[in-house]
Image: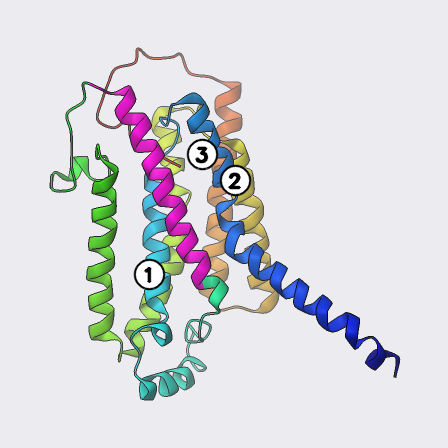
Amino acid sequence: MEAEGLDWLLVPLHQLVSWGAAAAMVFGGVVPYVPQYRDIRRTQNADGFSTYVCLVLLVANILRILFCPYYHFAKPAFSRSHSVECQHSGFGRFGRRFESPLLWQSAIMILTMLLMLKLCTEVRVANELNARRRSFTDFDPHHFWQWSSFSDYVQCVLAFTGVAGYITYLSIDSALFVETLGFLAVLTEAMLGVPQLYRNHRHQSTEGMSIKMVLMWTSGDAFKTAYFLLKGAPLQFSVCGLLQVLVDLAILGQAYAFARHPQKPAPHAVHPTGTKAL
């Protein structure tokens, strides 16, 4: 009887918690990039960050959106049969309909990465006035993702989305393709910190990298991995989450090691690999 009498309080409270959790899911992923964005604007220097981090997140979130066939291309008959098949596959979570917050999260992350690329490109071009202009239509692989105009990055993202979307449309009746697409989205996101790790190793420095960003990566990935383990998620989820945590810890280890044993600064020269982003 008392429980029924408290419904007027518990129901709105439960709804409020649900809204809060959805908001955290949608916007929580972009929070680590706020201090990085502010640091780049303040210093007008993006050399400490790998733009390939943006590339990884753009690819991962585009694949995640395309992965959910129920929102885009799936035929009703396939949707019903695919849901049954996924209950018996190792990718069982993949086959379930995405919640709206996950799709909004991907859309907002894509927008955030484009904003980061825009800022980094503007800062780099301003600091390298004598550098030769490189564009998306320059097919030299050494210059890939090191372009001089933000519009080139947008063209590349649109081209990738169009090709991936067309292939998805043609293959949407294949349960194997859909499962592979979902796994690639998760695996790509697990590679998030690798470009930054490589950049730090190549320069033997973490100068310009936001430690706050990496700490937020680590805490978020640790929480996510623990959630996967406790909920008994498919093995690939836990493995990818653990990989992310290990990469985050390796980056923090680099920051500690390079702070204790700083390298002698080398003479600065304008070079085409100055494109570093979040």
Among the two numbered marks 1 and 2 on one chain, the one whose residue lies closer to the N terminus: 1
| Image marks 1 and 2: residues in contact by CB distance under 8 Å | no
138 to the left or right of 27? left
Among the two numbered marks 1 and 3 on one chain, the one whose residue lies closer to the N terminus: 3
Quadrant for residue 78, please give it: bottom left
Q: Nearer the viewer, mark 1 or mark 2?
A: 1
Seen at 59% across and 57% down, the residue is: 226
Quadrant for residue 218, please give it: top right
Q: Which quadrant does the C terminus fall into?
A: top left
Q: Which of the pair 202/157 is nearer the observer?
A: 157
> In the current view of this chain or complex, which residue is farthest to the front?
8
Q: Which quadrant does the N terminus fall into?
A: bottom right
Give the label on residue 63, or none.
1
Q: Position of residue 168 (x, y in %)?
A: 25, 69
Seen at 63% across and 65% down, the residue is: 18
Give the label on residue 37, or none.
3
Amino acid type, mark 2: Leu
Q: Which residues are magenta?
A: 103-129
Give the label on residue 249, or none.
2
120 w.r.t. 262: above or below: below
92 w.r.t. 84: above or below: above
Amino acid type, mark 1: Leu
